Image: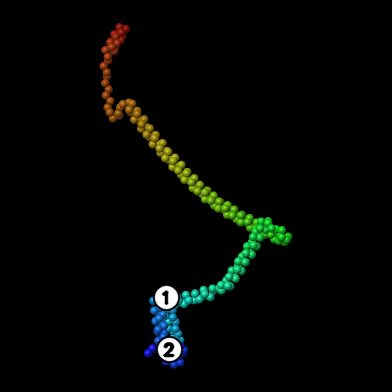
Amino acid sequence: MGRGKIEIRRIDNLTSRQVTFSKRRSGLLKKAKELSILCDAEVGVMVFSSTGKLYDFASPSMKSIVERYNKLKEERRRLPNPTLEIQFWHGEASSLRQQLHYLQQNHRQLLGEQLSGLSVKDLQNLENQLEMSLKGVRMRKEQILTDEIKELNQKESLIHQENIELYKKVNLMCQENTVLQKQVSGAECVNEANRSSQVSYGLLGCDLHTPINLQLSQPLPQKKEALAKALKLGLQLH
């Protein structure tokens, strides 16, 4: 025979109630575990007995499930009524149109247009507003110019310092060039003296270390006859 239908109401018998609680609690936690595994779902179950004892199951954790539940509950609570939302945005659009109209009218008046409907007091207020705006523009312009001048002065100081460093480097290079020129000139003088000595010795055709052989040359026949005549003439004079 099949199981009879159980009436869903509080069990009066304490023992039967405790037995039913134990069985159904175990079955509920088992089904929750199976649901989380089979369907890859986040499941959280908390059960308090009549005596205040806690039984729970959570996948992956009870804390994350509770935080997610509270977040979704808060978002649902903040969702407005569609009708009220439409009315709200209609009011916002009307307010923005009025602000746009006022700004356009004020802009035209600042440009000197559509002044026919203004009183003397309105014109005075408009003039004061223009003077304040002009003062603010001038202050801003002066601030920009002051900043630019300050920046240019700083650049000038840097350039001046760089020029000083370059001037020092140029002077050092000039000094080095002077020393090099002196060294080159000295070397050229020594080379010129050596070349002159070599040329002189070459013209003489002699070497200090080579002995010199001197020989008397024999007179030529004609020179012999002239010499004999001179000697004869000399003897005759005596």
Q: In the image, which disc is placed on residue 41?
A: 1
Please tell me which residue is depicted at 63% across the width and 58% down the height of the picture.
136
- Residue occupying the far bottom of the picture: 13
Q: Is residue 238 left or right of residue 7?
A: left
Q: Quadrant of residue 48?
A: bottom left
- The type of residue carrying mark 2 is Lys
Q: Is residue 128 visible?
A: no
Q: Is residue 74 left or right of residue 104?
A: left
Q: In the image, which disc is placed on residue 155?
A: none
Residue 1 vs 149, above or below: the answer is: below
The percent position of residue 45, horizontal first and vertical second, equals 44, 80
Check disc 2: other Cα within 10 Å, few if <14, some if 14-19, many if 20+: few
Residue 127 versus residue 58: which sits nearer the camera? 58
Please tell me which residue is depicted at 26% across the width and 16% down the height of the picture.
218
- The type of residue carrying mark 1 is Ala
- Of helix, strand and loop, which one carries label 2? loop
Please tell me which residue is depicted at 71% across the width and 60% down the height of the picture.
117
Residue 156 versus residue 20: which sits nearer the camera? 20
Residue 117 versus residue 214: which sits nearer the camera? 117
The percent position of residue 77, horizontal first and vertical second, equals 53, 75
Please tell me which residue is depicted at 69% across the width and 59% down the height of the picture.
126
The residue where tag 2 is placed is: 5
Q: Nearer the viewer, mark 2 or mark 1?
A: 2
The percent position of residue 147, horizontal first and vertical second, equals 57, 54
